[in-house]
Image (cartoon, rainbow, N blue to C red):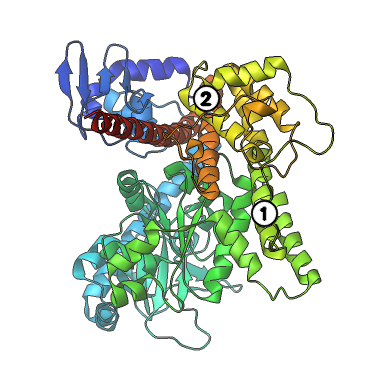
Amino acid sequence: MTITPQWKDELRARITLSSVIMRTDKLTKAGREWKGCCPFHDEKTPSFYVNDQKQFYHCFGCGAHGDVISWMTEQRGLSFIDAIKELAAEAGMEVPAPDPVAAKRAEKRAELIDVTTEAQDWFVEQLRGSAGREALAYLNRRGLKPETLREFGFGYSPESKQALPTALPRFEDHMLVEAGMRIRTDDGTTYDRFRGRVMLPIQDARGRVIAFGGRILENRDGVAKYLNSPDTPLFDKGRTLYNLHRASPASRQTGRVVVVEGYMDVVALAQAGIKDAVAPLGTALTEMQLEMLWRMVEVPVLCFDGDAAGQRAAMRAISRALPMLAPMRSLSIVRLPSGMDPDDLINDRGVGAMEKLLAEPKSLLDTLWEFERDAMPLESPEAKAGLKKRLMEHVDTIGDPDIQSLYRRDLLDRFSAFAYPPRQQAKRGPWRGPAAAPKTLSNGARSTLQKSMSGGQRSDLLGAVIAGLVRHPGEISRHSEALIELARHDQSAAPAIESLIELAETLDSRIQTAISAEQGFPAPPVDNRYAFLREGTPPGEAREELAEAVSLLAHKPALEAAMAATIARFDEDPEGSFAEQARLRQQLMTVDERLKAFGRKKAGSDTARDENSVSSDS
């Protein structure tokens, strides 16, 4: 299928953008445009504008921008092709025909969806009839409400091996086999795959039934508790997430997606009001499933049972994710109390306990460190060396060089603090300069730093960060890679960063105290607006805020450059470009919010200082 730019232009011309948006969001007329509150971020004052003549929408608050196609993909959650098909039907246009092989494949999928759809209807009927009495009692004992059973489409498959051909007579036996509903043996006989099981439909992103999961009513030796459909032309378990079609719109409201171990966990959470949960289907998370999750949110929350199996599942997911990490794209991990799954926790302690855990997940980095640290006793140098080796093997799998470097540094710092705890040392006096003959900071570098700290730079935060690094010079080398990346994307920051690197080369690597003017360096200011520039701030707090500020400064221009590159390749790969733009735009929004938080902190400090000044004057 070839969607040309000319065809898309014709499609946009036939669709009134404002009318599409007003199906879900309120707009009011504003001259030649329409305006309203942005659907992509929370706001009280409208900053979202729609221009039908120019065929685009734009939010001046969060920067969301696009046309009717991107609206369907980003706000409605459709794939590019599904958005094109829906809009084309509305506009009365024919979508360019796919090649013959793809057309035959699509026809086959449509036929098999008819099979699974009718099978689903029949399973639901069985649960409501006499054959499903025991299954319905089992579901009631598990505490599932009637509305939950209806929403998730619970059904029942009778014990008979030949029930489906009688129940679905219009479909030939080979179609039932191809849809995964029946099994063909080597001698050519066939029988029903699901027998005597509570049935759950597995649906695609559009809500169409493509497969099934079945659970036995009571545990029996040699019988699998859960049984899923095999891979078919409809169903690829490595490319499917259970409940995605419900969780995706919920996730756009919560800004979160929760990944649990099985579909009954999803059902339990949904019944308790947590609607943004999905589950893999009997396998560890795959690369494709991780990509699907990252299209929804930057940091999905993985929620695992609190037993050894749950811990191993968390590590399998982490190992799969490490090579795929990217700026503002990671995972967070929640471990449930030992011996509990989500249903147990909610029944025992209430949904509030579950929400509290989900609100305070551990980072991927913390989980990785704790798992390897606790994997075996560390009572000998050899065991400690083994810990370091395992950590570095994980780090070596990370594809992004900046993230790999940051993980390496952080994990080595943790390992050093753990393996070589600090000894009591006599207090050291103020630093008086390197013991050996130091390099001297050039006059030009000294002048550049002085100018950046006194407000001569374009960014007020950049000036504060430069001053913070002069006040805490031991942090310069720690953040050198992020600073160099910032200089690469922001030429206005390059001179000050070059001077900082030059400053770092003049220092004893152990130095932590501020550089003073008497030592030939510009004196860092004392400024209550930021913790890293306040007198008396605990070193850990100062380093933490300074690290966040450096990260923000480096990330935003890098993301903007990535966005420009993605937009430039739109004509070559429209669907991929749309998905990547959505992901990058979400990341930019997050960075902007964090930058605003720094701004609010600054404004709050300024206000407090002014009030104190007025109080002193009076």
**Lateral position of residue 310 relative to residue 51, left or right:** right
Q: Secondary structure at mark 2?
A: helix
Element assignment for label 1: loop
Near-viewer residue (111 or 427): 427
Give, as a three-letter code, the residue at label 1. Answer: Lys
As drawn, the label of residue 241 is none
Instruction: Classify 429 as above or below 13.
Output: below
Q: Position of residue 318 (x, y in %)?
A: 59, 57
Mark 1 or mark 2: whose residue is earlier in sequence: 1
- How many marks the image carries: the answer is 2
- Can you identify the residue that label 2 sits on? 463
Q: Residue at x 30, y 62 (%)?
A: 270
Asked whether the residues under the numbered discs 1 and 2 touch, taking CB atoms below 8 Å apart as contact, a structural biologist would say no
Q: Residue at x 30, y 59 (%)?
A: 274
Nearest to the eye among marks 1 and 2: give it: 1
Residue extending furthest toward the left? 28
The local crowd at label 2, few if under 14, some if 14 to 19, many if 20 or more residues have their Cα within 10 Å, is: many
- The three-letter amino acid code for the residue at tag 2 is Gly
Please determine whether, in this image, residue 87 is positioned above or below residue 315.
above
Q: Quadrant of residue 124?
A: bottom left
Left or right side of 150 for 463: right
Residue 617 visible somewhere in the drawing: yes
Above/below status of 178 relative to 160:
above
Can you tell which quarter of the image residue 283 is in?
bottom right
How far is disc 1 from disc 2 in space, using C-alphas? Answer: 32 Å
Coordinates of residue 203 in the picture (x, y in percent): 38, 55
Q: Residues within 10 Å of mark 1 (few under 14, many from 20)?
A: few
Residue at label 1?
A: 427
Is there any visible trace of residue 192 in the rendered image? no
Query: Looking at the rendering, in which quadrant would you find the C terminus?
Result: top left
